[in-house]
Amino acid sequence: MATGKNTKFYETPNHPFQGERIAQEADLLGRYGLKNKEELWRAQSELRDYRREARRLIGEAQGDMEAAEELGEEFLDRLRRYGILSQDADISEVLGLDVTDILERRLQTVAYRKGIGHTPQQSRQFIVHGHVVVGEGRVTRPSKKVEAAEEDLVAFDEGSPLSDELHPERAEGQE
């Protein structure tokens, strides 16, 4: 019997049938090539956690932004390393983040933006099938967050048939 506890890493919406929200979610699923709404809800929960942490730090520093940034230096460095925040952003900008800021850092989206696939869905398939590497390591998880420094290291695996520029599935003008 498993000893770990079962926990979801996301929260579902409070009101399941809101037409406007459902339409927005469907748009994001299509734009970012997400498999299901659970992936979107995970990103929203991650964003919620970032905002909660920023509010906690600002509250702990009693509104003093400089003190809050010193308290949350590691937290802000992590967000900057992943490219979610710009290098000169302060802690108050965490409160203004959008779910698209999180979704843009997924390997699937980074690979699509680099032209690895014609669509986000095709980029996802190439990743899952093991055709994509980040640096030296093959990654088969489309949800992996890519650090800003690793972005240039996303490419086709040399052993993959897709590494041949003449492969029919390669988009025009790729590296």
Image (cartoon, rainbow, N blue to C red):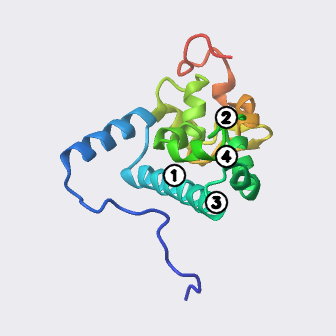
Residue at the (49%, 23%) spot, across then down: 118
Residue under pointer 4: 79
Residue at the (73%, 54%) spot, across then down: 67
Sequence-wise, the earlier of marks 1 and 3 is: 1
Sequence-wise, the earlier of marks 1 and 2 is: 1
Sequence-wise, the earlier of marks 4 and 2 is: 4
Disc 2 residue type (three-letter): Ser
In the rendered image, which quarter is residue 150 located in?
A: top right
Mark 4–mark 1 contact, CB under 8 Å? no
Residue under pointer 1: 47
Disc 1 residue type (three-letter): Leu
Q: For numbered disc 4, what is the local secondary structure?
A: helix
Residue under pointer 3: 57
Mark 1 or 3: in front is 3
Which of the image's four quarters has the C terminus?
A: top right
Residue at the (57%, 54%) spot, across then down: 50
Q: In the current view of this chain or complex, which residue is farthest to the right? A: 136
Sequence-wise, the earlier of marks 4 and 1 is: 1
- For disc 2, the neighbor class at 10 Å (few under 14, some 14 to 19, many from 20) is few
Disc 4 residue type (three-letter): Leu
Where residue 24 appears, as percent x and y from the top left, is: 30, 40
In the rendered image, which quarter is residue 90 located in?
A: top right
Above-or-below relation of 128 to 15 = above
Q: CA distance from mark 1 to mark 3?
A: 15 Å
